[in-house]
Structures are given as structure tokens and as C-alpha cells.
């Protein structure tokens, strides 16, 4: 293929996961980009229910039509206490991956200026006047490239910023008997054996007999598959669930790091999603922060072109950095830290803090609930580390 045959686009999106699909969907809804050409490249067809996203919110959103379940109450527990959290005015919401893909891709398929191809991106090369993109079967050029393909080796081979994983296996199960509290989500249950790590169970009931039961860790290393599944079986036994059917399974591993992804942004190439630091570093939550960032990005694209000016570091980056420093050095403290927040803290304020919407005074109310010494030590370590 010679250069005259290479197709040119205004925007190419390398990877079509959550962040890309949110961004392009909002660009369509804005009606500000109808004269621009788009190419989305991803080897996955997005036709399976490969994940479940959960998030809390208190206002209407453009995703309301695909929310499969809402909870007004949540439960937090460890081996010593259990607390029912009245989270109003927030609600905890669940969206199935396939429902999200179907909503967005149905809209995109109607746009004559948008092309979605199932090709794997193999090469990205920024030139003075455009960006070259190579796939396993074709070559393209564009004015601007938005990349959401995460480079695991690049991040994990550096030593300056801790890299943990939020890794999990979940079972969608159907019990023979009604055992679940339909009105309450189990947000974090640290009553499971910690064994030197941060481990908890997560339960999302959709009926009195059906629920997603997930075993989750915040740590560096993944476990053998059977260890996750043994813990799920043990937990179901403790809940009194003896006879059940496994309807679906899901598993994943989400990077948790404060690595400065924005430093890789250039004039024409922007990194988004996990590849751009859009995952909440201290919790692994992705949907809510991607929703916010994609809205910011669409507004930015309407008036700006230099991607180096898109990212702005906030105080919450430093808060996340301190927690990750602690979990990197003392992973066993995770249960203690989260328990100190939720045992007596204001759950609404904690959710507001995790959404990065609190004032500095509100930040202090949350932070002062945490054990002081580990955070003071982490603060001094990171001051020295960032000066290097």
C-alpha cells in the first residue's frame, strides 16, 4: 500500500473501551463534530458481557436507561463490626458491560462520519503534520490520535511510583433459596481472611436469589484462579448459600498507580482511560471518573488542539499517592484504613471525597479518620521520592 492509498481521519481512537466509547458518544451527542471523521480501532467486537461497572451518583445521567439495578443502602464490614450505610442522596448503581456497548455502538453505527474496525493497533508514530497508525492489516493517518491501549511494561518497569492491582473474580449466582437482601449492596466485607494482604468480598444482589459475588484484592501479585474461587465458595457457605447455579463469571485486573501518564501526552497524541490515568488510583474505580474526564475532554476538543495542555494534577492525586505508598509497603493495612473511614465516618462525605468533589476542610474530616502514623511516614517518603 503506498502513501496515496492511506486513508486519513480527523480523529483515530486506538482502543475502544470505556473511555473511548464514552468520549465518542458524547462527541456525537454534542453535535459539534459532525464535520469530523472518526476511526475507532479495537480487536474486540464488544459483543459480550465482559465486565460490570458500579458507581454511586445522586443526579440523573445519560446512562440511566442502562442501569440494571440501584441500591439505596450499602454494607461495610470487617472481622469486628458490620455497619449498614444509608447512602442517600446517593444511590449505588450497576451497569452491565454489554448494555453499555449496545447503547453506544447503536448510536455510533448511525453516524456516517464514524468507522469502527476490528483491527489491532501495532504502531503509532507522531509526525510533524499528522500521526501515522499501523494495524495488523492496514495503515492510517490522522490529525489527532486518542489512545486507550495500556502499556503494562512501561508503567511496571519504573520504580518511582507504586503499581498495585485491583484484581478479582466474580460469580453471578442463582441460589435455590432466597438469601440475599435485595435492597442492600455489600460494598466491602473485610471479614474474609486477610493473610497479609488487602482482601474483601463484594456482593451485588439483583433479586433475593441472584447476586454477583466477587472476591477482590488490592495488591501487587495475582493469585491462582482456584484461590479466588475457593474464597467465593467459602463466603457463600458462610452466607448460608448451599445450593446454587453459576450463571456467569467475570474476572479482571485493574492497575492502581499514580504514575504520571499525562507526561506521555504530546501535541497530537492523548492517552485516556487506564492508559491516561483515568482509573481512580486509590480504589480502582473507573466508570465515574471516566464519565467526568470524557465530558472534560469533549469540551476541550471543541476549543483546543494541543493535547499537552489537557491534564491538570489535583490535590487528590497526592492523597491517592499516599495511600498507594502505604499499601505498597504494608498491604496488610488496607482493612484497617478503610475500616477507620467507614466505622464512624459520614458515608456521604466519603463518597463525595472518593468522587474528588470535597473542599479542603471536608478532606480533613475524612483524612483525620485514618490512622495517622502510616500516612505521616508515607508523606515523608513521598516528599523525598518526588524530589529525586
Image (cartoon, rainbow, N blue to C red):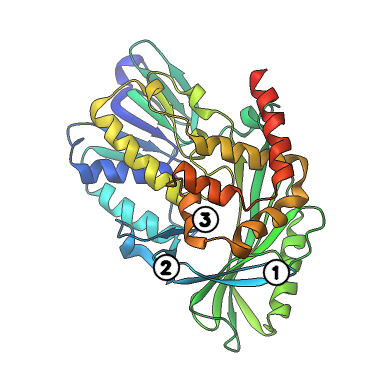
Q: Earlier in the sequence, mark 3 or mark 2?
A: 2
Q: Secondary structure at mark 2?
A: loop
Give the camera-side residue of 110 and 253.
Answer: 253
Q: How many neighbours does mark 1 have within 10 angstroms: few (below 14), some (14-19), or many (20 or more)?
A: many
In x, y percent, where is residue 217? Answer: 69, 54
Q: Secondary structure at mark 1?
A: helix
Picture layout, residue 329 above or below residue 136: below
How far apart are the two marked residues, 3 and 1, measured between alpha carbons? Answer: 27 Å
How far apart are the two marked residues, 3 and 2, measured between alpha carbons? Answer: 12 Å
Give the camera-side residue of 160 and 378.
Answer: 378
Q: Residue at x 38, y 54 (%)?
A: 101
How far apart are the two marked residues, 2 and 1, measured between alpha carbons? Answer: 29 Å
Q: Along the horizontal axis of the image, is 171 left or right of 51? A: right
Give the camera-side residue of 370 and 183.
Answer: 370
Report the disc number at residue 117: none
Is residue 69 visible in this depiction of the protein? yes
For mark 1, what is the residue?
Answer: 232
Q: Earlier in the sequence, mark 3 or mark 1?
A: 1
For mark 3, what is the residue?
Answer: 350
Amino acid at each position: 500500500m503506498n502513501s496515496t492509498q492511506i486513508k486519513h481521519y480527523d480523529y483515530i481512537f486506538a482502543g475502544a473501551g470505556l473511555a473511548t466509547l464514552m468520549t465518542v458518544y458524547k462527541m456525537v451527542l454534542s453535535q459539534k463534530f459532525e464535520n469530523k471523521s472518526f476511526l475507532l480501532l479495537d480487536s474486540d467486537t464488544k459483543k459480550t458481557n465482559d465486565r460490570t461497572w458500579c458507581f454511586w451518583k445522586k443526579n440523573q445521567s445519560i446512562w440511566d436507561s442502562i442501569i440494571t439495578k440501584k441500591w439505596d443502602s450499602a454494607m461495610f464490614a470487617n472481622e469486628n463490626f458490620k455497619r449498614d450505610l444509608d447512602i442517600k442522596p446517593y444511590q449505588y448503581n450497576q451497569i452491565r458491560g454489554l448494555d453499555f456497548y449496545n447503547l453506544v455502538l447503536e448510536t455510533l453505527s448511525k453516524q456516517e462520519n464514524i468507522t469502527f474496525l476490528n483491527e489491532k493497533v501495532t504502531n503509532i508514530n507522531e509526525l510533524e503534520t499528522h500521526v501515522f497508525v499501523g494495524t495488523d492489516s492496514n495503515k492510517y493517518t490522522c490529525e489527532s490520535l486518542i489512545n486507550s491501549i495500556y502499556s503494562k511494561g512501561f508503567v511496571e518497569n519504573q520504580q518511582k511510583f507504586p503499581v498495585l492491582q485491583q484484581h478479582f473474580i466474580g460469580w453471578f449466582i442463582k441460589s435455590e433459596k432466597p438469601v440475599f437482601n435485595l435492597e442492600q449492596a455489600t460494598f466491602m466485607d473485610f471479614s474474609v481472611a486477610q493473610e497479609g494482604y488487602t482482601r474483601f468480598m463484594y456482593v451485588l444482589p439483583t433479586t433475593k436469589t441472584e447476586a454477583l459475588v466477587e472476591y477482590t484484592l488490592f495488591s501487587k501479585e495475582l493469585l491462582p484462579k482456584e484461590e479466588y474461587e475457593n474464597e467465593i465458595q467459602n463466603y457463600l457457605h458462610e452466607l448460608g448459600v448451599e445450593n446454587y447455579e453459576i450463571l456467569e463469571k467475570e474476572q479482571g485486573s485493574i492497575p492502581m498507580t499514580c504514575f504520571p501518564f499525562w507526561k506521555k501526552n504530546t501535541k497530537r497524541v492523548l492517552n485516556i482511560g487506564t492508559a491516561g490515568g483515568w482509573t481512580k488510583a486509590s480504589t480502582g474505580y473507573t466508570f465515574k471518573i471516566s464519565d467526568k474526564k470524557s465530558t472534560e475532554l469533549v469540551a476541550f476538543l471543541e476549543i483546543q488542539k494541543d493535547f499537552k495542555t489537557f491534564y491538570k494534577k489535583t490535590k487528590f492525586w497526592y492523597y491517592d499517592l499516599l495511600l498507594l505508598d502505604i499499601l505498597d509497603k504494608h498491604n496488610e493495612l488496607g482493612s484497617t484504613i478503610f475500616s477507620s473511614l467507614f466505622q464512624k465516618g459520614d458515608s456521604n462525605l466519603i463518597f463525595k471525597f472518593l468522587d474528588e468533589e470535597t473542599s479542603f476542610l471536608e478532606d480533613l474530616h475524612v483524612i483525620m479518620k485514618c490512622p495517622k502514623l502510616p500516612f505521616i511516614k508515607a508523606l515523608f517518603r513521598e516528599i523525598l521520592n518526588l524530589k529525586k
